[in-house]
């Protein structure tokens, strides 16, 4: 559900944490996870191989070859984003060559291959603790994440994209986050209803 996070634990201690508006199918016997919607964080002690299946391919971790590990996998329009927080993971596109990612790396997994390999953006992983910690990040990045935790519609004027944000924001109270933004930035929150919010540049007075 929107705004809800939960954790599922396998018998071997592997944990699957679901972000808001996410859905999985689990096969605990064969140690497989199918990510159907949204985003998950998976931590395994590495006692046996674990497979995370996504529409564009699969991510493997654990077992004798890869050992203990932690990954975050997020579905996006073109495929999925894979971030390796600890250990190692093998990323296998459905129509391309496998690539091994190490801790601190992320990549986009699409059906035809693997793209945009680089250093993972640590701030995007804050959802696991119910917060986003931003350091001079684009306001658009924060609002894009907040929109995933609010029922209804959250929109903003593109003119606000250039504004930068620093701070720690709790995801369980998005109304409070919007109030803080209006108090600290030149933005105004316009509420047509509780479920239809638009942010616009604050009007200046002469």
Image: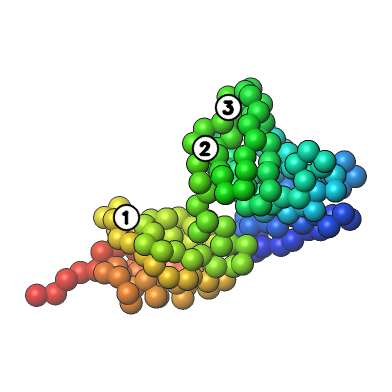
The nearer-to-camera label among 3 and 1 is 3
For label 3, the residue is: 113
Say which of 67 and 176 sits in front. 67
Locate residue 92: give its quadrant. Answer: top right
- Look at the numbered disc 1 and give the secondary structure of its residue: helix
Considering depth in this image, is 199 or 136 the residue closer to the camera? 136
Residue drawn at x 35%, y 69% as measured from the top left: 189
Using residue 117 as the reference point, say whether residue 52 is left or right of it.
right
How far is mark 3 from mark 1, CA to CA? 31 Å
* Label 1 or label 2, whichever comes before in sequence order: 2
**From mark 3 to mark 2, how far is it between C-alphas?**
11 Å
Q: Secondary structure at mark 3?
A: strand
The percent position of residue 75, horizontal first and vertical second, equals 59, 43
State the image coordinates of residue 200 (x, y, percent, origin top left): 29, 63
Question: In percent of the image, x 52 and y 37: which residue is there?
Answer: 117
Task: Please identify the quadrant where the C terminus is shown.
Answer: bottom left
Most extreme residue toward the left is 206
Q: Closer to us: mark 1 or mark 2?
A: 2
Residue 51 located left or right of residue 28: left
Looking at the picture, how far across and down is residue 135, in whole percent? 41, 64
The residue lying at 52 percent from left, 49 percent from top is 120
Residue bearing the label numbered 1: 161
Quickly name the residue at label 2: 117
Give the colour scheme shown. Answer: rainbow
Q: Nearer the viewer, residue 88 or 116?
A: 88
Q: Residues within 10 Å of mark 3 (few under 14, many from 20)?
A: some
Query: Is mark 3 in CB contact (under 8 Å) with mark 2?
Result: no
- Quadrant of the rendering where the N terminus is positioned: bottom right
Tell me, for residue 102, which label it has, or none. Answer: none
Instruction: Tell me where residue 5 appears, x and y as whole percent.
Output: 66, 62
């Amino acid at each position: 559900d929107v705004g809800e996070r939960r954790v599922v634990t396998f018998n071997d201690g592997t944990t699957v944490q679901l972000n808001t508006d996410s859905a999985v199918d689990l096969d605990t016997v064969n140690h497989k996870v199918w990510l159907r919607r949204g985003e998950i964080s998976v931590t395994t002690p590495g006692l046996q191989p674990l497979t995370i299946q996504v529409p564009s391919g699969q991510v493997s971790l654990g077992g004798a070859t890869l050992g203990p590990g932690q990954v975050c996998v997020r579905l996006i329009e073109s495929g999925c984003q894979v971030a390796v927080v600890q250990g190692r993971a093998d990323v296998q596109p459905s129509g391309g060559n496998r690539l091994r990612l190490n801790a601190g790396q992320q990549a986009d997994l699409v059906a035809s291959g693997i793209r945009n390999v680089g250093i993972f953006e640590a701030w995007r992983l804050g959802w696991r603790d119910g917060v986003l910690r931003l350091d001079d990040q684009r306001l658009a990045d924060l609002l894009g994440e907040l929109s995933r935790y609010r029922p209804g519609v959250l929109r903003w004027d593109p003119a606000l994209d250039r504004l930068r944000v620093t701070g720690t924001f709790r995801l369980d109270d998005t109304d409070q986050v919007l109030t803080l933004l209006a108090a600290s930035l030149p933005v105004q929150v316009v509420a047509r209803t509780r479920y239809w919010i638009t942010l616009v540049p604050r009007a200046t007075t002469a």
